[in-house]
Image (cartoon, rainbow, N blue to C red):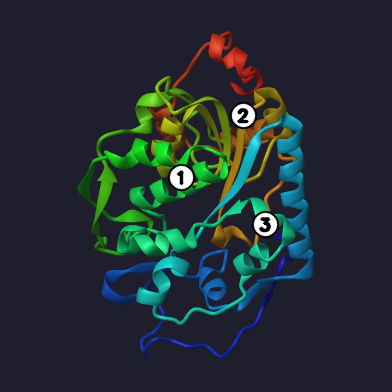
Amino acid sequence: MQFPLTQVDIPPVEHLDDAAPPSIKVLEGKQGWLFLDNDTNGSVDQYRGRLRLTEAGVDQWQQYLQGVEQLADTARAAHAVLVAPSKESVMGPSYHPFAEGSNGPIQQLMALPEARNIIYPQALLTQLGDEAFIRTDSHWSHQGSMVAATALATALGLDSPAVNALFAEDEYVQRKIAGDLGNKFTPERHCNIEVLRSFSYVKCRYYDNGLPNFGRLSVLVNDQALMPGVCLLFGSSSSYSMLHYLCRLFQQVVYVHSAGSIDPELVKAVSPAYLVVQTNARFMVQVPEVDQSLLTLIDEKRARLSEDEWALVAKRQVSVAHDDALICKLNLTPWLV
């Protein structure tokens, strides 16, 4: 599906040197830092200020943010919209080969009155420095996601000293990875990153349909979490590393991979104490929905899976009975397919 949300100024072609532009969707920056290039969201043009939302796109974002607030009010849930800053906006000034522009989609969004409930931790991640993102990947690091989770917790009204104390003793270990950018090269590019060693959300998985990306539904349970109650999270791929921290903040986390699109029927069924939507700044050119059907999303994803993908689902999923006590308490039975 295409959205008429952007206006693009296309200048004469520029290259960093006289060589032909690479065919892979990776832009090489300074000191081995890799960035997205030629992706469907126009990340480079967004970063350089060449791609902006149209008035119609801004209006749709306003309607979406108003819809999220209305759903949260109806559910009597504390809520927030967490926007993961792009790697370019945090690491770009130091390592991106192009200069940063101004007034791109994220700046347009943050200028709206409805942005009062948006958490955009760009400044906090910048303070973290090189540890905020992965050199050969487009996502934030574990420590970057911890900073975002902490900012989110504060916005939701949790006690900041208690949250900080919860993560203060975390232990990290270095790992060598290629990442979603490094693996586009032959041979692969790798980097060393600090990954959380002392805790993993995987051990808290109570239910997981195992679907890849959109349509994934997981339930995490941690009875030793800081806060009782349920956090319902409609998130993106950036949410997965945050789960290491969120399931220590909230006793039960219901996670839906939807890039911020919300199923109001699921909100009504779960009746969460906390409602969180998480998307990425580079996704701003595509407005999430407040009336998406998760069941339809799941059915469509299952219909498209290849045999190899089904094999991965089988390895990843965690099943429960339809009459499981917790699943029934959360009213999730209709979505267990």
Which residue carries the number 2 mark?
273
Q: Is residue 146 left or right of residue 302?
A: left
Q: Is residue 86 visible?
A: no
Q: Amino acid at mark 2?
A: Ala
Q: Amino acid at mark 1?
A: Ala
Measure the alpha-carbon separation of dots 2 and 1. 17 Å
Q: Amino acid at mark 3?
A: Ala
Which type of secondary structure does the marked residue at label 1 adopt?
helix
Query: Are there few (<14), some (14-19), or many (20+) residues within 10 Å of tag 3?
Result: some
Which residue carries the number 1 mark?
149
Q: Quadrant of the N terminus?
A: bottom right
| Point 59% across, 21% down: residue | 336
Front-most of residues 308 and 50 = 50
Measure the alpha-carbon separation of dots 3 and 2. 21 Å
Which residue carries the number 3 mark?
115
Q: Are marks 3 and 1 in contact (CB under 8 Å)?
A: no
| Point 26% across, 54% down: residue | 193
- In the displayed structure, would residue 199 be above or below residue 164? above
Q: Is residue 8 left or right of residue 71?
A: left
| Point 32% across, 69% down: residue | 33
Which type of secondary structure does the marked residue at label 3 adopt?
helix
Q: Is residue 127 visible?
A: yes
